[in-house]
Image (cartoon, rainbow, N blue to C red):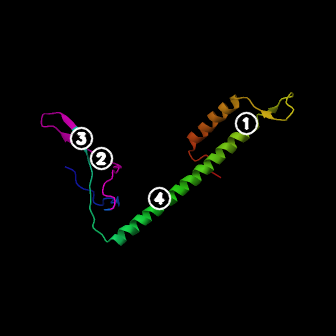
């Protein structure tokens, strides 16, 4: 028998304007279910459902505050993605540039480097990111 948690984490999932939806259960706990015939049966998943009746103004305020949190989280994620992308490209460019050379027959002065340089850069960068996942986030 499972007992409810003393302080459940209740979250607003919707209102009457959106009566039908599917919600993912995070941290679902399996419930063991023993069979009377001796072997264990397939366990189920336990979930608590709460229904709260509140004034619409209070509910709308909760929805707006949660939308603000989601929007700021998305903006932060986009800023980090842009920062990481910029640093990766700069790192690759600087690494490859250090191995570049001009060809004597090239009149335009373009620089070239062996493709092995990119493979070496990839392996080195992967090793650094594995040892420090925030490698490209540092200043």
Residue 21, how many percent across, how many down?
33, 53
Among the two numbered marks 2 and 1 on one chain, the one whose residue lies closer to the N terminus: 2
Instruction: Tell whether 91 sits left or right of 103.
Output: left
Give the tally of numbered discs.
Answer: 4
Q: Which residues are magenta?
A: 17-41
| Residue 137 at least partly seen | no
Can you say whether 64 is above or below 45 in the image?
below
Among the two numbered marks 4 and 1 on one chain, the one whose residue lies closer to the N terminus: 4
* Residue denoted by label 1: 96
- Say if the magenta span includes residue 40: yes
Give how far apart the Cα atoms at labels 4 and 3 are.
Answer: 34 Å
Residue at horizontal 76 percent and vertical 38 percent from the top: 97
Residue at horizontal 54 percent and vertical 57 percent from the top: 75
Mark 1: give few (<14), some (14-19) or many (20+) Cα within 10 Å: some
Return the residue nearer the eye: 136 or 130. Answer: 136
The reply to whether discs 2 and 1 touch (Cβ–Cβ < 8 Å) is no
* Residue denoted by label 4: 70
Residue at horizontal 64 percent and vertical 43 percent from the top: 88
Mark 4: give few (<14), some (14-19) or many (20+) Cα within 10 Å: few
């Amino acid at each position: 028998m499972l007992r409810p948690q003393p302080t459940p984490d209740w979250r607003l999932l919707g209102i009457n304007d959106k009566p039908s939806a599917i919600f993912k259960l995070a941290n679902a706990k399996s419930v063991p279910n023993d069979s009377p015939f001796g072997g264990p049966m397939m366990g189920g998943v336990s979930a608590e459902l709460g229904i709260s009746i509140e004034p619409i103004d209070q509910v709308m305020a909760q929805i707006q505050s949660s939308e603000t949190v989601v929007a700021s989280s998305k903006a932060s994620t986009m800023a980090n993605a842009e920062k990481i992308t910029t640093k990766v490209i700069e790192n690759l460019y600087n690494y490859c540039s250090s191995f570049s050379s001009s060809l004597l027959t090239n009149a335009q002065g373009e620089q070239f480097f062996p493709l092995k340089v990119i493979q070496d850069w990839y392996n080195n960068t992967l090793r650094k990111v594995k040892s420090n996942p925030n490698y490209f986030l540092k200043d």
